[in-house]
Amino acid sequence: MHPATGCCSNPMRHRAHLVIVITIFWSRENNVKACLPLEFTQEQYDTEDRKLVVALSATLGLFAIELAGFFSGVSMFSSSQGLLSTGVHASASVALLFFLFEQWECDIYWWIFAICSVLPAFVEILLFIAVFGLKKKPL
């Protein structure tokens, strides 16, 4: 393990976040119902279910970007990306556990998604551009 970046602990937080997202995928029925009024139609249920599936699928896509950057070596020893990634994925793990067990409304997932999935993937893309496009050393 690299002491400055914690490169071996970073994938552990990715996996925790990933496992929780997959668990929500498998058991999303209660979370979808939490997004609906007490009396709802099948069409409303299908719409909310589709929105949640899109959000969860986008999360998985952003995981792929982050893991590609990590395993290609672009961000493996980047202390700033390691710190950001560790912080947001640990936070996402905790927030998504509450989302799953407390059956929070689906709109909250989009906030968790923006902060804990889009932000680190965006930084990863910037690192890709810096390393491969501009031939810079990662921060």
Image (cartoon, helix red, strand yellow):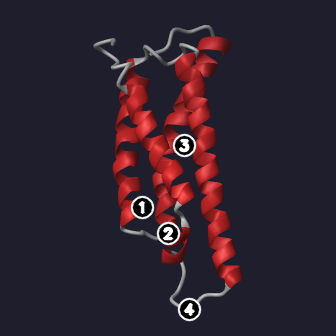
Alpha carbon distance from label 3 to label 2: 21 Å
Of pointers 3 and 2, the one earlier in the residue sequence: 2
Give the residue drawn at x 43%, y 27%: 11
According to the picture, the residue beneath numbered tag 3 turns out to be: 118
Specify the farthest residue to the bottom: 39
Mark 3 and mark 4 in contact? Answer it, CB < 8 Å: no
Q: Residues within 10 Å of mark 2 (few under 14, many from 20)?
A: many
According to the picture, the residue beneath numbered tag 1 turns out to be: 100
Q: Is residue 84 visible?
A: no
Numbered label attached to residue 39: 4
Specify the farthest residue to the front: 26
Of pointers 3 and 4, the one earlier in the residue sequence: 4
Mark 2 and mark 1 in contact? Answer it, CB < 8 Å: yes
Q: Position of residue 28 (x, y in %)?
A: 54, 64
Q: Is residue 118 visible?
A: yes
Disc 2 secondary structure class = helix
In the depicted structure, whether residue 37 falls above or below residue 125 = below
Mark 3 and mark 2 in contact? Answer it, CB < 8 Å: no
Give the residue drawn at x 33%, y 11%: 2
In the depicted structure, whether residue 16 falls above or below residue 22 = above
Q: Residues within 10 Å of mark 3 (few under 14, many from 20)?
A: some
Q: Position of residue 51 (x, y in %)?
A: 64, 64
Of pointers 4 and 2, the one earlier in the residue sequence: 2
Give amino acid for label 2. Answer: Asn
Give amino acid for label 1. Answer: Leu
According to the picture, the residue beneath numbered tag 2 turns out to be: 31
Give amino acid for label 4. Answer: Glu
Give the residue drawn at x 59%, y 17%: 130
Alpha carbon distance from label 3 to label 4: 34 Å
Q: Nearer the viewer, residue 24 or 115?
A: 24
Alpha carbon distance from label 4 to label 1: 22 Å
Of pointers 2 and 1, the one earlier in the residue sequence: 2
